[in-house]
Image: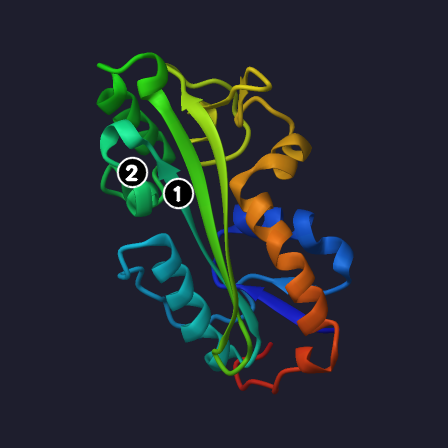
């Protein structure tokens, strides 16, 4: 069975990948089975740059097909912030409560269309040699509400209102979010490439010393 590795240890992102690609019959994994995989510093300054760094750095080390993914929230009224710094907006990586609180403070003077925002997900697929095979981007547009709504999802989801549903990602059932999220749109574009490359002869990469 061909293995596809998400270049992350974020279990929530892995769960979404499994939900989106689990029907393909692949061995889907994050970096958990690879304790010796080095951390990849997100220094590129852009979503596509960070995703490319993850994919091209990790794939040859693991000897596996790797998806490097970088995502975040973009608020035009804040000059694009939180942007690539979405996970550490308030200073501590992954502190969702602090990040949400800072976003609410920064947007307090804004109303209506000035609270428009979009999630972006950039995913890069690299083969076991580190060659980039595909680069895709998905976006989902919404509005930032004035208080947390719902407990589902992660990151800024309880603040991100999807207009067509009148609910935040924190309120919507996971299956609804998975159909329309930025990550779902990115992975939908990757599907045909994954099917072609990993389920064909070219999908069988070399064995790696880091393989579990």
**Horizontal side of residue 118 vs 197, given as left or right:** left
What is the spatial separation of the Cα atoms under label 1 and label 2, in whole angstroms? 7 Å
- Residue at screen point 35% across, 66% down: 40
As displayed, is residue 13 above or below residue 77? below
Look at the numbered discs 1 and 2 and tell me whether their residues touch, using CB distance below 8 Å: yes
Depth check: give the residue in front, 10 or 123: 123
- Residue at screen point 35% across, 13% down: 112
Residue tagged by mark 2? 82
**Horizontal side of residue 48 vs 32, given as left or right:** left
**Horizontal side of residue 90 vs 31, given as left or right:** left
Disc 1 crowd rating (10 Å Cα; few below 14, some 14-19, many 20+) is: many
**Sequence-wise first label, 1 or 2:** 1
- Residue at screen point 37% across, 53% down: 47
Element at label 1: strand
Looking at the picture, how far across and down is residue 59, in whole percent? 49, 75
Element at label 2: loop
Depth check: give the residue in front, 27 or 66: 66
Give the image quarter of residue 24.
bottom right
Q: Is residue 37 visible?
A: no
Q: Is residue 146 visible?
A: yes
Looking at the picture, how far across and down is residue 33, in whole percent? 56, 68
- Residue at screen point 68% across, 47% down: 19
Disc 2 crowd rating (10 Å Cα; few below 14, some 14-19, many 20+) is: many
Q: Which mark is residue 72?
A: 1
Looking at the picture, how far across and down is residue 113, in whole percent? 35, 17
Q: The C terminus is located in which quarter?
A: bottom right
């Amino acid at each position: 069975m061909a293995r596809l590795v998400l270049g992350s240890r974020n279990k929530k992102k892995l769960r979404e990948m499994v939900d989106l690609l689990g029907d393909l019959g692949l061995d889907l994994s994050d970096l958990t089975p690879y304790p010796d995989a080095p951390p990849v510093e997100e220094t590129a300054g852009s979503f596509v740059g960070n995703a490319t760094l993850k994919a091209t750095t990790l794939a040859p080390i693991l000897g596996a097909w790797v998806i490097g993914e970088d995502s975040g929230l973009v608020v035009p009224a804040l000059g694009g912030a939180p942007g690539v710094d979405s996970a550490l907006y308030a200073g501590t990586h992954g502190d969702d409560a602090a990040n949400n609180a800072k976003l609410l403070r920064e947007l307090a003077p804004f109303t209506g269309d000035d609270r428009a925002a979009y999630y972006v997900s950039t995913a890069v697929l690299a083969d076991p040699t580190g060659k980039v095979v595909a680069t895709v981007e998905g976006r989902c547009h919404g509005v930032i509400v004035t208080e947390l709504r719902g407990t589902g999802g992660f990151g800024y989801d309880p603040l991100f209102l999807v207009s067509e549903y009148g609910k935040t990602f924190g309120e919507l059932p996971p299956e609804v979010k998975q159909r329309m999220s930025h990550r779902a749109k990115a992975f939908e574009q990757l599907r045909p490439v994954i099917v072609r490359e990993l389920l064909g002869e070219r999908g069988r990469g070399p064995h790696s010393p880091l393989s579990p």
